[in-house]
Amino acid sequence: MTLTGLAHSTRGRPHFVVSVSAEQDTTVIALQGDADLVALSTLVDQMADVIADRQGAVVIDLSDTDAIDTSCVRAIGQVAQWLAGNGRCLTIRAPSRTAIMSFATLGWADLVESHGETPR
């Protein structure tokens, strides 16, 4: 069963959308569009809601993300650290090569799911 909620950025470009769904005991936060500084507050708000309202693992799905900048990578990494300190985990699904490099540069390469797929 998948439950989906949408958050549209009211401050930024309207094409950035954050969808939250449940996959068994994991919460998936799917980003669509450009995850940039303008979209950061929407992303942070949704991650905070997931942390507060749900239990279990969290997956950030970047398969429909056109670009992700360092501010969003940092926010995701900091949330991952907080979750790990509280017995939960966060992973990144389907990042682009550029996103993988950004996570690696900031020391969070271990967050990227590895299923033998070639990054886009």
Image: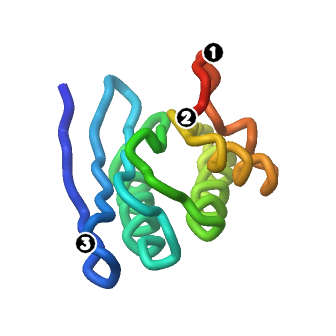
Coloring applied to the structure: rainbow
Which of the pair 70/119 is nearer the observer? Answer: 119
Q: Which mark is residue 116?
A: 1
Q: Which amino acid does the dot numbered 1 rest on?
A: Gly
Q: Which quadrant of the view contains residue 39?
A: bottom left
The local crowd at label 1, few if under 14, some if 14 to 19, many if 20 or more residues have their Cα within 10 Å, is: few
Tag 1, which secondary structure?
loop
Label located before the other in sequence (1 or 3): 3
Residue 87 sits above or below residue 69 on the image:
above
Residue under the point 59% across and 65% down: 69
Q: Residue 57 appears at what percent x and percent y?
A: 49, 35
Residue under the point 32% across and 23% down: 24
Which of the pair 70/86 is nearer the observer? Answer: 70
Residue under the point 74% across and 36% down: 110
Q: Which quadrant of the view contains residue 6?
A: bottom left
> Distance of mark 2 from mark 1, alpha carbons?
12 Å
Query: Does 60 sit left or right of 6 as displayed?
Result: right
> Distance of mark 3 from mark 2, alpha carbons?
24 Å
Residue under the point 51% across and 34% down: 94
Q: Residue 27 appears at what percent x and percent y?
A: 38, 38
> Distance of mark 1 from mark 3, alpha carbons?
34 Å
Closer to viewer: mark 3 or mark 2:
2
Query: Does 49 sit left or right of 89 as displayed?
Result: left
Q: Residue 56 appears at what percent x and percent y?
A: 46, 35
Q: Which residue is mark 2?
A: 120
| Labelled pair 1, 3 in contact (Cβ < 8 Å) | no
Q: Which residue is mark 3?
A: 14
Q: Residue furthest top?
A: 116
Tag 3, which secondary structure?
loop
Query: Does 18 sit left or right of 68 as displayed?
Result: left
